[in-house]
Image (cartoon, grey):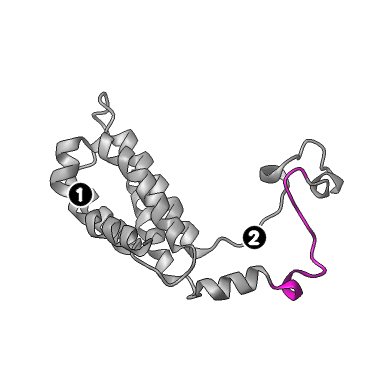
Amino acid sequence: KPVLLEFIRTKLPDAREQPAMTLEEYKKHVNDIQAHTEQQLYSCGSLAPKLRKGGAGRIGCMSCGITRPKALWERTDGCLYLIREIINVCCEENNIELELDDETLLPLMEEVADVCRVKHFPQSDELRTTLFRQLPDIARKLGKQRFKRTYLQLFLDLIMNTIDSRT
C-alpha cells in the first residue's frame, strides 16, 4: 500500500502540466489533413497489425502493438481508478491488515478535487467525468456517514461548477 500511495501522489498532479490547448486548437489539430497525410491508418479490426512479422493472434485494437506517448492528464485519470481500487481493497469488511484512515486519505482526496479543477486542455472534461463516475463507488466503500462527514464537501463546488459550465 505505501508504495502504491507514493506512486499515486507523484502521478496524480500531472494533469496540471498538460500543455494548454483550447478546444478550437484541438479540433484544428485533429482535423488537420497535413498532419495526418502519409501516415499509417489503423482502425478496429484493421489488417495492419496482422501483416506484421509474428502478428498471428494479435487481433483488434488492444493487441495490435501500436503505442503513443501517454498524455499527462491520462496519468491523473489512471490515478483516479487506482484510488478507487485502493479504497475498495482497504475498506473490505474482512480486511484488518490494510486500513485506510482519514489522516492518509483526506490529503489525497483534497489533491484529487484540486487537480480535477484544471480546465486548460480539451480533455479536462473527460478527467472530471472519470472522477464523477468513481465517486459513487468510493462513497459506498467508505460508508455514507464517513463520506458525507469528511469528503463530500471537497467535491460539491466542483460538481456544481461542472453542471453550471454545461448550460
Which comes sooner in the sequence, label 2 or label 1? 2
Q: Which residue is mark 2?
A: 68
Q: Locate the N terminus and report the quarter of the image it occupies.
A: top left
The stretch of residues the image draws in magenta is 32-45
**Residue 35 is covered by the magenta coloring:** yes
Q: Where residue 130 sits: x, y (%)? A: 42, 50
Q: Which residue is mark 1?
A: 151
Residue at mark 2 to residue at mark 1: CA–CA distance? 36 Å
Amino acid type, label 2: Arg
At 74% from the left edge and 72% from the top edge, which residue is drawn?
33
Apparent side of residue 84 relative to residue 31 in the rendered image (left or right): left
Q: Is residue 94 visible?
A: yes
Q: Where residue 131 sits: x, y (%)? A: 37, 51
Q: Where residue 67 sits: x, y (%)? A: 67, 56
Apparent side of residue 122 relative to residue 138 in the rendered image (left or right): right
In the rendered view, tell whether residue 165 sits above or below residue 80. below
Q: Which is the main secondary structure of the residues drawn in magenta?
A: loop
Amino acid type, label 1: Tyr
Q: Where residue 6 sits: x, y (%)? A: 35, 54
Q: Residues within 10 Å of mark 2 (few under 14, many from 20)?
A: few
Front residue of this view, candidates 35 and 4: 35
